[in-house]
Image (spheres, rainbow, N blue to C red):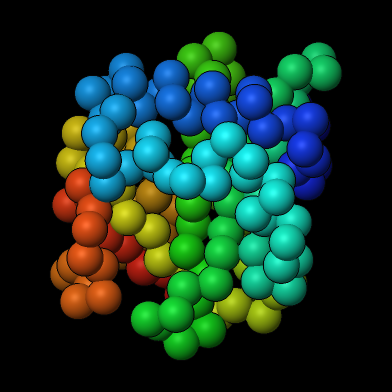
């Protein structure tokens, strides 16, 4: 697996991977990334502010196999939100999720962030296992989170 920064050529592939994963878990509903207004143009969103955002693509044999992003989060100090960690079914189970987590955390540190926040839903058991194994601790729902279908919230000190 190769890892690199997102480019505009990746937009359709990563949007498809994200929507396929969400639909498979019946999460093609409002309040999820499925309806994120930036989803079809993630490169535009992440590349627009490289001092505060970053998206990492996992690529295998020239094809996008997944990715993960981060963006500044305003309601915790020195904090980035881990965003849109998804892999194709073929890429799952090979440790690539752990590799993406480690690499995005390194990117967050390089941008000066001291913590990472994420939100997920209880039905994504494999994701929750990954997050907890990577040292994220569950917290109460932050008051600043208003319109979200997510019901699990995590924070990690970097």
Q: Nearer the viewer, residue 59 or 97?
A: 59
Residue 152 percent coordinates (x, y) = 22, 54
Query: To which quarter of the image does residue 121 belong?
Result: top left
Please state the horizontal and vertical placement of residue 78, each as a whole percent of the image: 53, 84
**106 left or right of 28?**
right
Q: Is residue 29 above or below residue 26?
A: below
The residue drawn where x is 39% and y is 35% is: 34
> From this viewpoint, is residue 126 visible?
yes
Image quarter in which the N terminus is found? top right
Q: At 31% across and 62% down in the image, what residue appears?
A: 154
Q: Is residue 131 left or right of residue 81?
A: left
Q: Which is nearer the eye, 144 or 136? A: 144
Q: Is residue 144 above or below residue 97?
A: below
Rendered view: 71 above or below 44: below
Location of the C terminus by quadrant is bottom right
Q: Is residue 107 visible?
A: no
């Amino acid at each position: 697996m190769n890892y690199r920064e997102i480019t505009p050529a990746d937009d359709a592939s990563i949007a498809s991977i994200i929507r396929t994963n969400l639909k498979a878990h019946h999460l093609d509903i409002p309040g999820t990334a499925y309806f994120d207004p930036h989803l079809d143009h993630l490169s535009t969103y992440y590349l627009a502010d490289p001092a505060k955002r970053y998206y990492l693509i996992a690529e295998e044999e020239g094809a996008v196999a997944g990715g993960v992003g981060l963006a500044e989060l305003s309601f915790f100090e020195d904090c980035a939100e881990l965003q849109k960690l998804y892999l194709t079914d073929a890429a799952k189970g090979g440790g690539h999720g752990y590799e993406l987590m480690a690499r995005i955390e390194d990117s967050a540190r390089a941008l000066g962030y001291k913590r990472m926040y994420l939100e997920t839903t209880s039905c994504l058991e494999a994701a929750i296992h990954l997050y907890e194994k990577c040292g994220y601790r569950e917290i109460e729902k932050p008051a600043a989170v208003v319109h979200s279908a997510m019901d699990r919230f995590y924070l990690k000190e970097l």
